[in-house]
Image (spheres, rainbow, N blue to C red):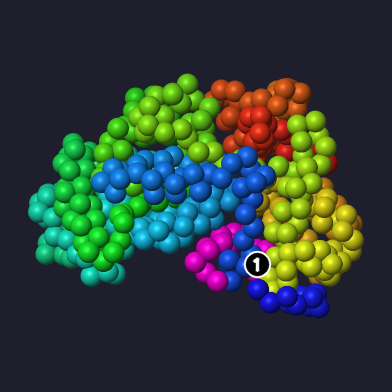
Amino acid sequence: MVALNNCSLDLLRFYRACNPIKTLNLQNPEDREYYIDFSSVRGAKRIENMARTINRLSPNEPTFQLFTGHIGNGKTTELLRLKTLLEKKEFHVVYFEATEDIDIGDVDISDILLSIARHVVESLKELDITFQPSFFQQLFGQIQQSVPRLNLTGIDFSIGLVTITTQLKGSFNERDKLRAILEPRTPNLIESINQDIIEPAIAQLRTQGKNGLVVIIDNLDRIDNTLKPNNKIQPEYLFVDRGEQLRRLKCHVIYSIPLILTFANQLQALESRFGKNVKVLPMVQVRTRDGKPFEQGIDLLQQMVLARAFPDIEQQKRLDCITEIFDKPETLKKLCLISGGHIRNLLVLLFSCLQQEDTPISIQCLNDVIRRQRDMLKRAITSNEWKLLEEVKNSKLVRGEDKYTTLLSSLFVFEYEDQQSQWFDVNPLLEA
């Protein structure tokens, strides 16, 4: 990194870099300049631990790991970082977002399995590794008879998988017809994915010097809490009731899962199914349990903002450039504190300021944005929820699915971790 110290701000680039919907991909050189490692203030090195689990076991021994946290708290960026770490260890990594193929309001196991098959096949096709499994050819024929308009006869295998997953997501009317064929054949589907895709793929990857195959499935944490016919909420149905099927794939797999499962009565059953503890990504800690500012976390959040403004300047020297972005250093510190350590919340507040005025951002501008965000958040809170929030403020605890659904899913409460344990606190916006 070149050590310039002229604090020259490219406002348009900074504006684009602060877009809250932007996800950092560390394989992109520009994004690498923006990345800040928050593991020291999140409680543990989750991503490094997950990579170590894969690296240390025999290549013939598949692993299954579960990863979760608040939506918008940087999980996707961390999973993409995991992809980069594993690729440096010569693994072939297939990363994809489940929402590309799956209707998160209505999911079944066959949807997930076909999505995995599709993305593995598409990824390996780029390496000239192709497949023609006889089971899938028969399956395409059976689907063709039930849904003639899909035209699967003689179609390329990868295109056939794209066609079916697209219909499962986009066509409610044909979804039931497809599942009537797929669900009774789930054991055969798993067997074919293993024997006809994964195992030969790993064998061919090894001839290319690779250590194995890893599949990372992001965005399954967004699955709705809708009830399935057995009166189980969808996440429990998929990962607890049918988790045994999800762990039968013969490669390394990382599933993102809904945070609600860590509060469910079935948590122990879930971890027993997969043989691993769920890895939870907490917030960046900006306050201690007793409410005092946690300077280490605040400093790293400040660097996250400054890196987007001055990626070519060394970290320590960026601090001299704060007044190019904010009217005074205290304004940036307030932004970090009020975010509660939630990455996307911080960027939403910052981006809202940039939409309102050019740099340097004034404390008045930030206060106006905070007030509007606070009022919007408070509008949804009932009198009973205020009582629950008071309990959390005093006890630093959240227990049970009901309280999760009420407090955490609405971003009224955030989860943290320190050297003692995990703990919770009220979103600072509600106290602004």
Residue type (three-letter) at the residue carrying disc 1:
Ala
* Residue 102 on image: x %, y %: 37, 49
The structure residue drawn at horizontal position 56% and vertical position 45%, both measured from the top left corner, is: 45
Identify the image quadrant of the N terminus.
Answer: bottom right
Residue 195 appears in the picture as rendered: yes
Q: Does the magenta stretch include residue 282?
A: no
Q: Is residue 26 magenta?
A: yes
- Residue 56's quadrant in the figure? top left
The structure residue drawn at horizontal position 49% and vertical position 25%, both measured from the top left corner, is: 264
- Residue 32's quadrant in the figure? bottom right
Start-end of magenta stretch? 15-29
Q: Is the magenta stretch mostly helix, strand or loop?
A: loop
* Residue 83 on image: x %, y %: 44, 57
Along the horizontal axis of the image, is 339 left or right of 220?
A: right
The residue closer to the viewer here, 217 or 235, is 217
The residue closer to the viewer here, 193 or 167, is 193
371 w.r.t. 323: above or below: above
The structure residue drawn at horizontal position 67% and vertical position 35%, both measured from the top left corner, is: 418
44 w.r.t. 121: above or below: above
277 w.r.t. 166: above or below: above
The structure residue drawn at horizontal position 62% and vertical position 61%, both measured from the top left corner, is: 35
- Residue 65's quadrant in the figure? top left
The residue closer to the viewer here, 335 or 138, is 335
Along the horizontal axis of the image, is 423 left or right of 294?
A: left
* Residue tagged 1: 17
Q: What element carries label 1?
A: helix
